[in-house]
Amino acid sequence: MANNDSTQRTLLVAVVLCIVCALVVASAAVMLKPAQVANKALDRKANILAAAGLLVPGESIEAQFEQVTTKIVDLRTGKFTDELALKGFEQAKVAKDTETSIALGDDDLAKIRRRENFAMVYLIGKDGNYDKVILPVRGYGLWSTLYGFLALENDFNTVAGLGFYEHGETPGLGGEVDNPKWKALWPGKEIYDDGDVAIQLVKGNVDSSTPGAANKVDALSGATLTSRGVSNLLQFWMGELGYQKFLSNLRSGEA
């Protein structure tokens, strides 16, 4: 009998301990969530600034981000819209909602399945006098969807910078999208050639003597599929189903 009581007490203590631990973990998660959300938002702002070449290490990110104007664009019209509020806007949720997105089918070059009708964009400057525009982009590489920002100069064609803040590509191969040396190849490249999307990654070293060099960037060594994914996602988002109409409207002042 004593042994049975001992076993029952052991099980009871174990159950109580599990419950207490679960409550502690749940409480910690709830209490830490606001800080996690704030840190995620701060990291996003840092990545936006970095893509545009404007991030100054050691200085307040919030203060630096004051130069950025945030707006929502209707990708169907290529114009700014106030149909959706900036506060609480989550592009990922908009993309999953069948009411606010479209299925891509055979047009899914970036392999994202659905394209949202609305996108949050970031502009340096105000009242139509924009020095840069930073656009969220995403697309599938080898193992994962790459999420990043593409920054363009005020001709809305010349690349100011490209950076990915989330992906699961192979370290040392596709993961080299994070390599500062590779990212340094992008500024000055051009997205369009006579109005057509021409930007692409190519094998070998691109120099000024390479035909169409302005539209070409060195592919990632040993990462053919990731390189192809980066080319595809940029060609998709800079094309008709992406930001092409919006960028055209920016150039003409009709956004």
Image (tube, rainbow, N blue to C red):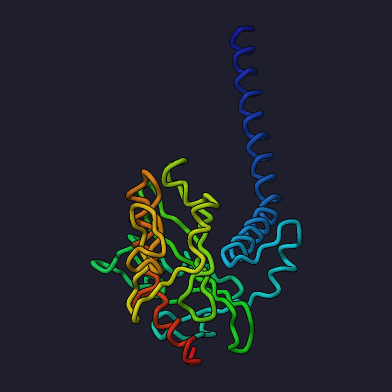
Residue 194 sits above or below residue 28 on the image:
below
Residue 159 vs residue 140: left or right? Answer: right
Residue 40 sits above or below residue 54 on the image:
above
Residue 140 sits above or below residue 107 on the image:
above
Residue occupying the point 40% across, 83% down: 245
Q: Quadrant of the N terminus?
A: top right
Residue occupying the point 55% across, 52% down: 180
Determine the image quadrant of residue 108.
bottom left
Picture coordinates of residue 79, whole percent (x, y): 47, 86
Residue 255 vs residue 22: left or right? Answer: left
Residue 20 vs residue 106: left or right? Answer: right
Picture coordinates of residue 192, whole percent (x, y): 38, 75
Q: Can you name the residue that lies furthest to the top here? A: 2
Q: Give whichever of 136, 220 is nearer the camera.
A: 220
Residue 145 vs residue 34: left or right? Answer: left
Residue occupying the point 35% across, 56% down: 229
Picture coordinates of residue 194, whole percent (x, y): 34, 81
